[in-house]
Amino acid sequence: MALPDAWLTAVLDAGGDIEPPPDPQIPTDYLQKPRRQHPASEQTQLLSSHLPSLPTSFSRPKRSRTPLSEINRPNDLHPRRRQRAPNAPTLVMSHTPRSPSKMSSRTARKERDTRNKAPRVEDVIDPNATLRPVRARNKLALALPATTTPVPALYETSMPVLTPNASKGEIGTDREDMGRSSSTVIESTASKARSRSLTKRMVDLRVAEKTVASKTVKSPADVPEDVRGLYKAIQSLTRVARGVIPLGIEDEVRNDVGGDLDDLDLLVEMKPNDMTREQLMDEFKALKGVRDSTAFCNTKCVHEPTWNERVHCRMLEQVVHNRPGFEYHNITVARVIKELVPGNKYGEFLKNKMIDYAITLGSPLFSEDQVITRLASSPRPLQRTINPSDYSPLCHNPVAIGIETKSSDGDKESARVQLSLWTMAYFNRLRMLTQDPVPITLPLILVSGEHWKLMFARDLEHSIEIIDAVDFGDTGDIIGCYKVLAALRLLCGWAEDTFLGWFSDTVLKPE
C-alpha cells in the first residue's frame, strides 16, 4: 500500500470523515478589509488563542475541516506550511467568520453612510478666508499660498469699561460717538483727515484754534454790555425773590409749606398777571411735581437721564408753555456738522460734543422762509441748517439759549467743556453768516442736579470767553422752583427782545 493510502486509512480508522474536503478558495464576501485593532487588543487576542475556549452550549461543537493537501504527513521531516489563498488579505481574519449576507449588508451600509456623510468643517475651503498650512493626521499638507488679507483679531480690540458711577466725561466713549457714521470720524485723504483730540478738561481748550478762556463775574462791569441788564435782573432775583409767586396762588403755596413762611407777602406779585386761575393751579401742580421728583432723584442717587426726564425737561416745559414762538428740544444725540467741529493748534479735531437742551425761536416770531432764503447763499454742506447741527428741529430755528445738564454728582468740568465746544461750533456757524468776531453774547445754562447756573459766552478777536455769572435757584423746594421759573422767563424775554432783533437784522438781512 502506498504511503498516502496508508495514511488516509489511518485517518479514517481514527474517526475521520469521508466527506470531500472543502474548497480551499475563500469566498469573495470574506475578503473585506478587517477593522484595525489596537495593539493591546491584538495582545489580548494572542493570549486568548492559547487558552481553551469554553463551550457556549452543550451541543457537540463543530470541528473545522482542513483540506487534505494542507495536512502534514506522519514522520515528515520537512512539514509544509499552510498555503494562503491567492486573494486572501494579509491581516489576520476574525476567528468567527460572518455569513456573506451579513457582510454584504454591512458593507452596503458603510458605503451609504460614506456617501451621505457631510464633509468636515476643516475640509471645506472658504473662498474668502486666508489659506494656511493644514496639519493632516499622519502628514503635513500645505495649502495654497495666501492671497487675501487676514481677518483682524477682534478679540484683541479694547473696549471701554462702563461703570454705574461713571459720568459722561469719565467713560471711554462719548455719547457723540454712538451712531456716528464713519464719514464724520475719518475724512478722505484729499480733504486732509485729522485725528481727534482728547478733550475732557478746560485746559485742553487752551490750545484750540481760538482759545477758550474762563472768567468769573465779580461785579456787573465784568459782564458784556448786551447782557448786563439780564444779569442784574437775575442776580436781584436770587438775592430777594420778590414777586416770584403769582398773585392768586399764595394760599396754596402757604398750605404747601405748612404756614412756615414769614416773608410770603414779599414773594407774591403785587399785580395780577395774564394767567387764569386754572392756569395758575396747573402751574402750581407742575412745580410741586418738579419739587417731589427732585427729592426722589436725590434720595435714589439716579443718573443724568432720570434727572432730565423727571426734573429738567418738566421745568423747561413750563417755561415755553403759553409762549408763542418758543420751543425746547432735547438734543442730546444730535451731532455737530463736521465742517463746524472746532480744531486745535496741533491740527486735531476737538470732539463734536452737543449739549442736552436748546430753547429755539420760530414762527410767528419770524418767517422760516427768510431762513431758507438766507441759507441758499451758504456753502453746500451748510445749506441745510442755521445752527451748527442739522438735526431737524434745529435746521430753521435758531438756538437762543443752550443748556447742559448733569446729575447731582456729575462732572461739572465736563459740563463746562461741553458748553464750550458747543459755543465754539455755534460761533463758527454764526461767523459764516455775519462777521468775525460775532457781535452778540450768548446765554448758557449749566444744570447740576437741582442747581441752576447762568453763564455767558462771548466771541472775541483771538479767544472765546466763558463767563461764570450767577446761581439763580434750585428745585429742592416750591419757592426755589418758582425762582428758577422766573429766571428762565427773564432769559426768554431777553431772547425775544435782544437776540431776535439781532438775528433778524444781522443774520437774515439780504446780502
Image: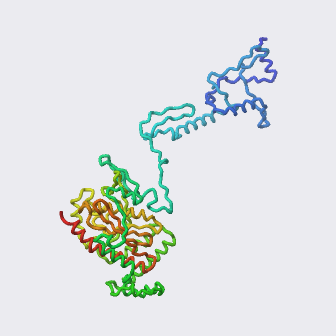
Q: Quadrant of residue 220?
A: bottom left
Whether residue 373 is situated above or below residue 18 in the rendered picture: below
Does the image show residue 172? yes
Q: Quadrant of the C terminus?
A: bottom left
* Percent position of residue 249, x then y: 39, 86
Nearest the camera: 272 or 45? 272
Q: Quadrant of residue 149?
A: top left
Q: Quadrant of residue 336?
A: bottom left
Q: Quadrant of the N terminus?
A: top right
Whether residue 237 is situated above or below residue 343 in the rendered picture: below
**Numbered label tally:** 0
Question: What's the residue at 50%, 34% (across, down)?
Answer: 133
Question: What's the residue at 49%, 48% (across, down)?
Answer: 155
Does the image show residue 329? no
Nearest the camera: 100 or 220? 220
* Percent position of residue 430, x then y: 27, 62
Question: What's the residue at 30%, 73% (across, down)?
Answer: 228
